[in-house]
């Protein structure tokens, strides 16, 4: 990393409703922790959300709900920046320039597009296809150096690095001429940490926990009350064997591995620590402990989210303030990019 780049964390969460335990452990917990060591910008990525059809009234509600979740989980919008993407036009503006830097072959290799588009690839939006270029713009609008990402977004971050590298190479002479040294954009580093970065369905340990799963028992929603959380943990799929005493024993037991990982992440322990405590015991004992822990950790978050969403004016004021502060940074980046590319402005 070039020494001239100030350490800065950027990440975003899509406002597509029903935030769940996977979003919390895979992303939001890390966001909260990173506040203590980094300057952070956290974005509700509503431009990404509309790559597939969204009901406008539901989208408005979901933007506020994700913002409420950020705050309820412990993100401080005064010390750090919390905003929604569509209020800062530089994201879309820089994405167009990146559309012209990125190569078609790069996007054709994106596995997540293939998964989301399915067999009817000709009928999905151009936005869904070009989504990784917008994600790169989200990061580079702030010249962010670090991005907390789940395993499923690592490929997109690699693309963001490729775009930054190509921009720096293509416009190297102009970057130097405008006084930015050898590179204008940093190559952002992924931050992947913790024992439950990928939380699986409570009904099927081979499938990722998802809001789109037909069964509500497959996930714990952040808005679930204590009774719902406890019931879902009790009904979570397991196998008949006792818990193993060592991590190796989890290898061919996806449901057991998932529940142990969830407990470890909620308790900020390793899976080995959890198995030292519960290994050899029955699942019923472990599930009771997991239910109590999940209720203690998630119950207050759900209650605070419900309180916050009842005051939309307060949430909107937080987003406006965050957008104003984000815009100040992004506008400076965009001005420099226009100079480097050769635009008159």
Image (cartoon, helix red, strand yellow):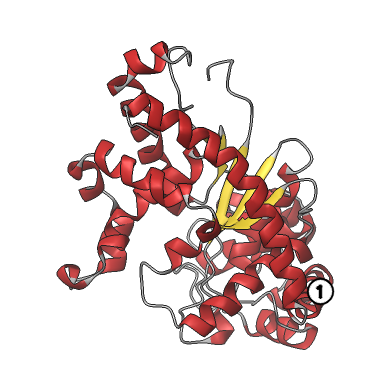
Residue 152, image quadrant: bottom left
Which residue is more in the foreground, 282 or 326? 326
Q: Is residue 262 above or below residue 120?
A: above
Residue 242 appears anywhere in the view: yes
Local packing at callout 1 (Cα closer than 10 Å; few below 14, some 14-19, many 20+) is some
Residue 244 appears anywhere in the view: no
Q: How many marks?
A: 1
Left or right: 119 as drawn, with respect to 273: left
On the image, the x and y values in percent for residue 29 come to 70, 55
Q: Is residue 264 above or below residue 80?
A: below
Quarter of the image containing the C terminus?
A: top left
Residue 44, image quadrant: bottom right
On the image, the x and y values in percent for residue 75 come to 76, 55
Left or right: 344 as drawn, with respect to 284: left
Which residue is more in the foreground, 144 or 242? 144
Which residue is more in the foreground, 232 or 126? 126
Q: Which residue is mark 1?
A: 304
Residue at x 73%, y 46% (from the top left corner)? 80
Q: Is residue 274 above or below residue 341?
A: below
Which residue is more in the foreground, 72 or 201? 72
Residue placed furthest toward the front = 345
Q: For numbered disc 1, what is the local secondary structure? A: helix
Residue placed furthest toward the left = 122
Residue at x 63%, y 85% (from the top left corner)? 235
Residue at x 45%, y 62% (from the top left corner)? 47
On the image, the x and y values in percent for residue 121 come to 18, 68
């Amino acid at each position: 990393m070039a020494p001239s780049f100030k350490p800065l964390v950027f990440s975003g969460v899509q406002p597509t409703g029903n935030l769940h335990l996977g979003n919390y452990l895979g992303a939001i917990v890390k966001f909260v922790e990173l506040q203590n060591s980094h300057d952070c910008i956290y974005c509700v990525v509503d431009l990404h959300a509309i790559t597939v059809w969204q009901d406008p009234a539901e989208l408005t509600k979901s933007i506020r709900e994700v913002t409420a979740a950020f705050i309820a989980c412990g993100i401080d919008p005064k010390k750090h920046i919390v905003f929604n993407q569509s209020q800062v036009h530089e994201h879309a503006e820089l994405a167009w320039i990146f559309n012209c830097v990125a190569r078609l072959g790069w996007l054709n290799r994106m596995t997540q597009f293939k998964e989301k588009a399915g067999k009817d690839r000709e009928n999905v939006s151009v936005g869904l296809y070009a989504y990784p270029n917008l994600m790169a713009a989200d990061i580079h609008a702030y010249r962010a150096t670090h991005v907390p990402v789940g395993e499923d977004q690592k490929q997109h971050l690699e693309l963001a690095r490729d775009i930054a590298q190509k921009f720096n190479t293509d416009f190297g002479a102009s970057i130097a001429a405008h006084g930015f040294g050898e590179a204008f954009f940093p190559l952002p580093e992924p931050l992947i940490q913790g024992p439950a970065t990928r939380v699986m369905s409570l009904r099927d340990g081979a499938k990722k926990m998802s809001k789109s799963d037909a069964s509500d028992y497959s996930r714990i929603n952040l808005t679930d009350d204590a009774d719902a959380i406890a019931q879902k943990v009790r009904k979570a799929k397991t196998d008949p064997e006792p818990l193993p005493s060592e991590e190796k024993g989890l290898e061919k037991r996806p449901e057991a591995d998932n529940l142990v990982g969830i407990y470890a992440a909620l308790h900020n322990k390793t899976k080995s620590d959890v198995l030292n405590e519960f290994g050899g015991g029955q699942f019923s004992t472990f599930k009771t402990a997991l239910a109590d822990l999940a209720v203690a950790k998630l119950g207050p978050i759900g209650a605070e989210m419900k309180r916050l969403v009842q005051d939309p004016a307060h949430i909107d004021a937080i987003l406006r303030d965050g957008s104003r502060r984000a815009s100040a940074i992004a506008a400076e980046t965009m001005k420099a990019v226009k100079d480097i590319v050769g635009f008159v402005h």
